[in-house]
Image: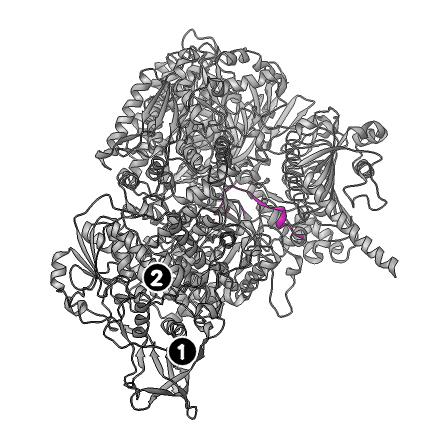
Amino acid sequence: MGKVTGFKEIERRDSSYAPVAERIKHYREFVIPLPEDDLRQQGARCMDCGIPYCHNGCPVNNLIPDWNDLVYDGNWRGALDALHATNNFPEFTGRICPAPCEASCTLNITDNPVTIKNIECAIIDRGWQEGWIEPRISPRRTGKRVAVVGSGPAGLACAQQLARVGHAVTLFERSARMGGLLRYGIPDFKLEKQLIDRRLSQMLAEGVEFRSNVEVGVTISVDGVLAEHDAVVLTGGSEVPRDMEKTPGRELDGVHFAMDFLTQQNRRVAEEHIGDSRPILAGGKHVVVIGGGDTGSDCVGTSIRQGAASVTQLEIMPKPPEAENKALTWPNWPMKLRTSSSHLEGAERDWSVSTRAFKGDGTRVTGLELIRNEWKTAPDGRMSMVEIDGTEFEIKADLVLLAMGFLHPRHDGAVDGYGVDKDPRGNVLANEEDYKTSREGVFAAGDMRRGQSLVVWAIREGRQAAHAVDTYLMGSSSLPV
Amino acid sequence: MHGSDHRQPAGLYDPDHEHDNCGVGFIANIKGRKSHEIVRQGLQILVNLDHRGAVGADPLAGDGAGILVQVPDRLLREEMAAQGVTLPEPGGYGVGMVFLPRVEDTRARCVASIERAIAAEGGSIIGWRDVPTDNSCLGESVRDEEPLIRQVLVAPPAGMTDQDAFERKLFVIRKQSHGKIWYHDADSEGDETGVFYITSMSSRTIVYKGMVLSGNLPVYYPDLHDERTESALALVHQRFSTNTFPSWKLAQPFRLLCHNGEINTVRGNINWMMARRQTMSSDILGEDLDKLWPLIGDGASDSATFDNALELLVAGGYSLSHAVMMMIPEAWNNNPLMDPPRRAFYEYHAALMEPWDGPAAIAFTDGKQIGATLDRNGLRPARYVVTSDDLVIMGSEDGVLPVADDSIIQKWRLQPGKMLLIDLDEGRIIDDEELKAQLASAHPYQEWLDRTQIQLEDLPEEIGAMSPDAETLLHRQQAFGYTQEDIKQFLTPMGLNGDDPIGSMGRDTPIAVLSDRPKLLFDYFKQCFAQVTNPPIDPIREELVMSLVSLIGPRPNLLELEGANARHRLEVRQPIISNLDLERIRQIENHVDQTFRAMTLSMTYPATEGPDGMEAAMERLFEEAENAVKGGYNILILSDRDVDADHIPIPSLLATAGVHHHLIREGLRTSSGLVVETGEARRVHDFCLLAGYGAEAINPYLAFDTLSDLAPRLGHDDVEKLQQNYIKAVDKGILKVISKMGISTYQSYCGAQIFDAVGLSDDLLARYFTGTKCAISGVGLDEIANEAVKRHAIAYQGVLQFSGALDIGGDLSYRMRGETHAWTPETIGLLQHAARSGDQNRYRAYAKKMNDQDRKLRNIRALFEIKFSDNPVPLDEVEPASEIVKRFATGAMSFGSISWEAHTTLAIAMNRIGGRSNSGEGGEDEKRFTPLENGDNMVSRIKQVASGRFGVTTEYLVNATDLQIKMAQGAKPGEGGQLPGHKVDAWIGRVRRSTPGVGLISPPPHHDIYSIEDLAQLIHDLKNVNPEARVSVKLVSELGVGTVAAGVAKAHADHVTISGFEGGTGASPITSIQHAGSPWEIGLAETHETLVRNRLRGRIAVQVDGGFRTGRDVVIGALLGADEFGIATAALVAAGCIMMRKCHLNTCPVGVATQDPELRKLFTGQPDHVINFFTFLAEEVRELMAQLGFRRFDEMIGQRDRLNSQAVIDHWKARNLDLSRLLHAVEPGPDVAIHQCEEQDHGLDKALDNMLIEKAASAIESGTPVTIETPVANTNRTVGAMLSGRIAKKHGNAGLPDGTIHVKLKGSAGQSFGAFAARGVTLELEGGGNDYVGKGLSGGRLIVYPPKAGNFAPERNIVVGNTVLYGGIEGECFFRGVAGERFAVRNSGVTAVVEGVGDHGCEYMTGGVVVVLGQTGRNFAAGMSGGIAYVLDEHGDFEDRCNHAMVDLEHIDENGPTSDGDVMADMTRDDARRLKSLIESHLELTGSGRARQILDLWDQYLPMFVKVFPTDYRRALAELNAASDQKKREGATVLAGE
C-alpha cells in the first residue's frame, strides 16, 4: 500500500558512493546506504500496483510491493520474512543485481522507479545486523541424499532449499572455497566475501555438507557420486569464455581472459594462493578491456584499483540509446546505455569498434589495431556488421582483457562424465519444469543449463530445481517454485 | 412443477426464474351494494391498465388477466335452476372455479378427486356447471393449453352454519383436491394433471382469469358480460410476465389477492413455512391443519406462494388485514413517528413471521372487506379515488376509470407500509391509523413482549474466549485458508475504518471450481441481486427501512392467537456477535428461567479420517443436531473452535446449511435457533452466506483474534474498538448485500438463500443446499473435503512454503504464486506493444497467451473446444474486418471516472471504425456533439442512462444512436455509485449539472424502474425523445437473467446487454467485484435460449460484455448467441491502462482513471492504438470464421453445436464440470430467428405528441408561439417528450424562448407526463398526473392542478404521482396538490412548488429549488447534496421527518442577507424574497388557495418555513462566492490603481 500519493510527493533518492579518489584505494564496498527515514520514505513511493510489474520483472519474483509497504510501516522484521519468502540470498542480489525490477517498476514509465534494490539491501543487512537470521533446520529427515555440483548461486540456493525440507545435501566445489562466481568472479568492492561466509555458516547449520577442492568427474567419479546419492544436481557455471582465436596476435603476452584476471585479484584480497598461473596485474599499464558487459566493467574497476595508467573499454555493438522507447519496451528490460560505478572511476569507452589485430613487440602486446563498424538490419530482422573502410586506427595496450561473455559450461568433468544431452549452444539440456537432464537422477540448473546470466536467475533456477528434485524424490513438494 | 412441457426446466431455462409485475386495480361500492356496473367498471379498469401488461411474440397471447368478484348469486341461481337445481341461500353454498385437463381420463381423475375431497369433509355437491367460454379470442400459443372450465357448487356439511367455518372447509377441500392429484397421482409427463387447478372455491368470491388479453376477458368469459353477474367489488389484475410460456394458473387474482411486485425472499419464506410444520397448531383449524400440506406449491410464482401463506393465516383465525400486516410489516424499528402500541404490535409479530420482503402493492379481499397495502418502501404505485356515490377506485395509476370531476371526494395514494381497507358490511373506509390502532390495542402486545423479549446484551456478563498465542493463531489462520490479502485488504481496513473495503477494475481470476488453489466453499457461491423486476435499496440513504435485528432461538406457534404460549425470544441488534456475547448464549440455560438451553456441536472431525471422512461427519452432525433438538435444546451452536492438528474443520457453510436443511426436513428447524461459531468467516460475503443458509447469529472468533494480533502493528491499542469497527464494517456490508436484492431485513434474509452456485454438483446442492440453483454442475463433497484437508495440512503438517507466513493470496492483486490472472505483466505488455506498434505478430503472441489456458484455467470458455469445419472457407471470402468491428463497442466509463483524454480517445477511435463508444454515466460535454475540423468525432454514440441521471438532458439523448439503460454493472450489480467531491472539478460539475466540490451519489435503483412495466415505460420515454436511437438495457449475468431479458424484449427494448461478472469498475466494494454476478457464458447462453424459446430473439440485438479480450472470446460469444460485443478493459489497456486498480483513489499513474491535471498529462494513448487493437481482434475472428466455414458473422450466431465441451480436462476440480446445460440447443422451429433481424414495434404512432408536433411545426421551426388544447387520458403516456426531442435536435439545450409552445390539457395524464420537456414548452394540465411527471425536465415548464370542478381541497389530495422530476435538469413546475413518494429525486436544477410530498422527498438532489407548502413524508433530503428546499412546517414535526445526515435546517429570516440581483441567482441570500416570489408564481399559475392563504398571512407563515440547506453545498457555494469576490476585488484594485 505504501502511501497512496507517495509517488507524487516524494522524489526518488538513491544510495550514493564514496568519492572515487577514496574508493579506488581499496577493494571494499563503497556504497553509502540511505538513512532509515529516507528508506522508509522511498518505500512510500511504491504504489502497490494492481499488477506489480516489478514482481514479474524480478526473476525470483520478489514480493516487492509487500516489503516496500512493510518498510514504509517500519516493520523490518516482516519485510525480511517477505523477502526471504522468494529469495535465499538478498544480500547478493541487493548488491550486484542490475535490478530488472526497477526497469519494470510502474514509476519507470517516467524514469523514476522505486529504489527497490536499495530497499532490498537495507532489509537484509538489517536482518543480519539485528540477528534475525537463523538457520532453519528441518524438523524431519527424509533419508534422501542429494549431491549438488557447483557452489555458485544456483548451487547454493538449491542446496539450501533441499536441506530445509530434510534432505541430506552435499555441495561439491572444485575450488578451495564455496561460492563460485560470487566468490571468484565478482570483485570485493561490489560484494565483500564475508557475506558469503555468513550464509555458508547458516547453511552448515541447516545440514548442508560442503566438499571443496573436489571436481566431480575428475577428482571423484561421476558414477560414484550418483551411486551415493538419490539425485545429482549440476549447478556449474558457464565457464568457457568467448575467445578471439582468429584475430592476429591473440597469442601475445598480456592478452588474458577477464575471468583469469578477476579471479586472481579476488584471491589476493582473500589472501588465498593464486595458484600456478602467473600474476596478471594492471598497475602502470594501459589496459584495454574488450567487451562492454558487466564482466568488462568489473575489469575496469579492478584495473583502476591496481593502478592502471589508463583503461579503455571497447564494445563491438553500437552505443545504445541513452533512453529507451518506453512505449515499446516497458515493462521489459530495455536496451539502453548503462554506466557502472567502475566507469565513473575513470575509463574511456568506445562503441562500434572491431578488433582487427593485436599488435606486439614479438612477445608482449603493445597495442590494438581497430576499425569502426556499422550494423545493418536485414528485412528478416537479422543484424549484420560491416566494417567501414578507412576508419582503421590503433591504440596503445599493455594489458588486454577479453570480456566478451561465455559460451557454455565446461564439458570435461561432470557434463561429459554423466553423458547428459546438450542443447545447440552447448548447455546442459533440461527444461524449467522438472530440470531433469537426459540422465536419470541427474538434474541441471543455473548457468550450466540456461547459459550465462544474472545471479538472480541462478538463484531462481536453484530454487526451482530444488522443488523439482524434491518432487522427484518425494512425489510432491512443498517447496515453492 | 406442474405444467406443460415447455415450462419444464431444460438447459438453463428454469420456470422458477419467471417474474411478473403488473397492473392491479379494484373498484368497490363502500356500502356493499351489488351491481353489474361494478363488474363492468372493473373490466374497464383492466383495459385501461393494458399498457402495464405485455404481449409476447404472439399478439393475442397476453400474459394473463383476471377479475375477482363476489359470487354472482343471481347468475348462478338462474343458470342452475335451468339445470333443475335449486341453490341454497346466498352464502349457504360455495362455488369452485375449476380448470380441468382436456384429456378425458385425466379429467375424470381430477373430478373424482374433488368429489372425494368434498365428501371426505362432509360437504356435498349441489351440481356442476360448464362455464361458457369463447376461445376465438385466444392466441394460438395458449389455445393448446386452454383448460376445460367448470364450476362446482358445494353445500356445507350438515349443520354448519357459520360462513367462516364453511370457508375454512372449502379451503381444506381445495387443498385436498389439488394435493391428491399433484403430489400422489402425478405420473408420467404430459398427462396434463398440471392443468388441473382450482382458481377459487368460496362462498363469497369467485375468480375468472386466463391467458387472455385484458380486453378479451369478457369475450372469453361471457359470464362477465352477463347483466346477472353482480358484485359490490371487483378486483382486477393484468400480468406482465418476463416469459410468455402460457400458464393459466399464474394469471391473477389468486384466491385472496393480487400482487404487483416481487417477493425477493420467497425461497426463504417457503423454507420457513415448511420448517414450521411441526411447531404449528391451531385451535380453530384443529386437525384440518394437517390436511393443508403441502401448504405451498400450486404455482411457481412468488405471488401465488404469498397467497398460499396468507390463506393459511386467515384460515388460522387472523383477520385478513392482520394477516397482511404480519407478512408485509411496515418499517417499525427505526421510525420515530410510530406510536408505542403499534411498534409493540409489529415487534411481537416479528418473531412469529419473517417479513415477505420485496416491492409489493397488494390488493386483497375476502368478499367482505377489500383493501390494499404497500411494502415498507412504497416501491409500487397505488392511487385511489373516493367518489360521492360511494365508490372507491384503486389502481396502479390515476385515471384508470373516468370519473366525473365533481363527484370526486378524495384523491390519494397508498403510502409506504400503509393500508387502505373498505369494510362492505360496515359500509365505510377504515383508514390506516384507525385500523392499526385497533389491531394494536386488541391485545396487550407490549406486555407480552416485556414478559418474553430478552435482549442479548441485557444478559449477565460472561467471560469471552481469549486470543491464542501467535503460533496457534497462525495455524488456525492457515487451517481456515487465511491469506495475506485477507489481512491486508479486508481485516485491516475493516478494523481501522469500519467500512467494507473498496476496489476497482474487474475480476480476472478463475471461478473457484477452475482455480488450482484450495478455495473456501463460500467462493463457489455468487450473490444474487435485483435487476429490473425489483429494485435494490439504498441501505445508507434509506436506512429507515433496514434492520439487522435477529431473533435467536425457537419460533412461536404461528397460529397461536392469544399470546398464550408466551415463549421467550432472544433478540440481538445485529447478528455478528462478540466472544462475550457468544458465551452469554452458551450459558443462557442458567438464566431466563431455563427457557433456553444451548448446545454446542462441533463442526470438526478427526484428521485421521481424511477427506473421505467428511460425509460421515456430516451425518453424525445431523444426528447430533436432531437429537439435541428433540432432547429439548433450543439453541444449537455450531462450532469449529476445536480445530487443531487432529481435527479438520468442516466448511462452516456446509455444516450450517446442512444442519439448517436437515432440521427443516425433519420439521424441527423452528424449534431451535442456529448460531455459528467459526474461524472461517471473515469477509462480508462469508457472513452473508452463513446468514442466507440459516445462521441467526455468527461469531467470527478467528477474525477477532487476528485483529487482536494486528492491533500493536496497526498502532492501535484499543483492541475492542478494532473489533467493534470490524463488526460495523460487516454489518454495513451485509446491509449492502441484502439491499442489492431489495431485501431490507436480516430476519427475512436469514435462510433466504439468495445465491447461485457455480461449479458445485447437483447432488451436493440437493443434499445440503436444497433449492439452490447452479448453471454448471461441478465438484462434490469429495473435492470440497479435499480442499479442507489441504488447508489443514498446510497448517499442521509443517509445510515449508507456508511456515511462518500466510499464503500470499493474489486474488485482488496479481502475485506470481497467487491466484491466476488474465491480466499479467506479460499480457499487458504484449497488448500495449502490439497496439502501439501496429505489429500483428505481437498481437498474436498476446492472443495466444490469453487463449491458451492449458496449464492455468481461468474461465469457462477455456473449457470449450471450437469444432472447426472440414470445409474451411478461404480467408478472403470472410466478411472483412471493417464490417466485424462495427459489432464492437467500448464499455460504459464516465467522464469523471476516467479522464477527458482517455474518454475522447476511445470515442474518436470507435467513431473512426464505425463501432460505438459509451458515454457512461455523467453526461457529455456538448462540444463533443459537433465533429472536429479534421473530421474526427468525439461523440459517444451510446449514451448511458443510469440511475443518477447526471447530465441526461434532452439534448444528450438526441445526440446518440443508442440509449443504454444501465440496470446493473458487472462489477457491482445492484449498487449505485459515488463520485467523491474532490473528483468533481468545475468541468465535470458543469457536464453533470452539479456544483464543483460536492460529491455525487447515484442511487442503487433507477427510481423510475421498480418493475418490468416501469422499465417498459422508461424505454417508451427514451424512444419518444429519440425515435431513431436503439434503446438498450444492460443486465448482469446471473441465473434467471435470460428470463429478465425476455421481459426486456417484451418491454420493447431494441437491444440488451448481458454483462459478465468480470466487468470493470471505477470503484466498488470488493465484495461485489469478487462475489456478485456470474460469468457471461452462463448469462448469455440462458438469454439466447430463453429468447429463442419465446420467439423473441429476432426482435432484439444481444450484446455481451465482461472480460472479452481476444477474437476467440468473440467467436465463442457469437456461437453462444451474441450479435455484438462490449470490450472495455482490453480497449483501455490498448489506450494505456496498466491495471493499477487505483481508479477509486484518483492516482492513476498513466492518466487514464484520474482527474489530477498532473497525472492526466501522462496519458499517451492514441486513437490509432485502440483501432489497431480492434482491427487485430477482428482479424483473429475472421481467421476463426474461415476455419469454422462461416463467411458472414450472422451465420455464426447461436451455433452452439460448434462448441464442444467434452474436451478432456485434466484438472482436479474442473474435470467434474458439466457444461451441457450451457450448450443445450433449443430447436428454434421454422421461421424462428436466432439472431437479431427485425424491428420492435414501439407504438409511437399512437403518441399524443404526433399531434402536438404537427400543430407546433412552425413554432419548432421558427419560434412562432402556439397554444394547443387537448384532452388527455392515462393511456397517453410520455406527453411532451417527442415534441421536446424535436426541439433539442434543432435547437440544442437552449431550446425555444419560454412559453413558445403552450399546451393545455385536461384529464388524468399517463405516466411520464412532461418527461424531458425542453425549454420553450409549457404543459398546463387540469386534472392530475401519474408517476414520473417531469422526468429529466430540460427547461420546460409544467403546471398541474386538479379539475376546477372538483369538490375537494387540492392541498389535501394527490395531484402528481411518485418519482416526480427524477433527474430534472432545469425548468419550473407548479403542482397544486400533493405529490407522491420521492418528489424531486435526483433533481439537478428544477425549481418546483408543491403542496405536500410523500416519503424520501428531494432524495439525492444536487441542485434546484423545491418549495413544499405542506407536510412531507419521512426521510426528506436523504442523500441531498445540493439545491435547497423550503418546507412549511406547520406541525413542527419536520425535524423528525427529515434525514439530517447531509443537510442543515435553517429558519428564514425576513431580514437575512439580500442582493438586488436575480432572485434565483444566489442560494445563500434572498431566501424570503425568493420564497415569496415562487409562491406568487404558484398562485398565479395554478390558482392555489393554499398559496393565497400563505401570502395573505405572510408574516404568520414565513416563520414556519424551514430552509433545508445541504452542508456540503453551502460550503461549496461559500467557496465559489469567496473566489468570485476575490476576483472582483482584484479587478477593483486594478481599476483603482490605474
The spot of residue B156 in percent (x, y) is: 42, 12
Q: Mark 1 points at which residue?
A: A308
Q: Residue at x 84, y 44 (%)?
A: B1459
The spot of residue A377 in percent (x, y) is: 40, 81
The residue closer to the viewer here, A74 or B1268, is A74
Quadrant hosting residue B155: top left
- What's the chain of the residue with tag 1? A
Position of B367 relative to B187 (above/below): above
Quadrant hosting residue B472: top left
The residue closer to the viewer here, B1379 or B517, is B517
Q: Which residue lies furthest to the bottom in this view?
A: A390
The spot of residue B867 in percent (x, y) is: 31, 59
Q: In this view, does A217 lie to the left or right of B957?
A: left
The answer to whether residue B8 is seen in the rendering is: no
Q: Does the magenta stretch include residue B979?
A: yes
Q: Mark 2 points at which residue?
A: A456
Q: In which quarter of the image is the C terminus of chain B?
A: bottom right
Label 1, residues with CA under 10 Å away: few <14, some 14-19, many ≥20: many
The residue closer to the viewer here, A455 or B316, is A455
Q: Residue at x 53, y 62 (%)?
A: B910
The answer to whether residue B920 is seen in the rendering is: yes
Position of A93 relative to A261 (above/below): above
- The stretch of residues the image draws in magenta is B966-985
The residue closer to the viewer here, B1010 or B547, is B547
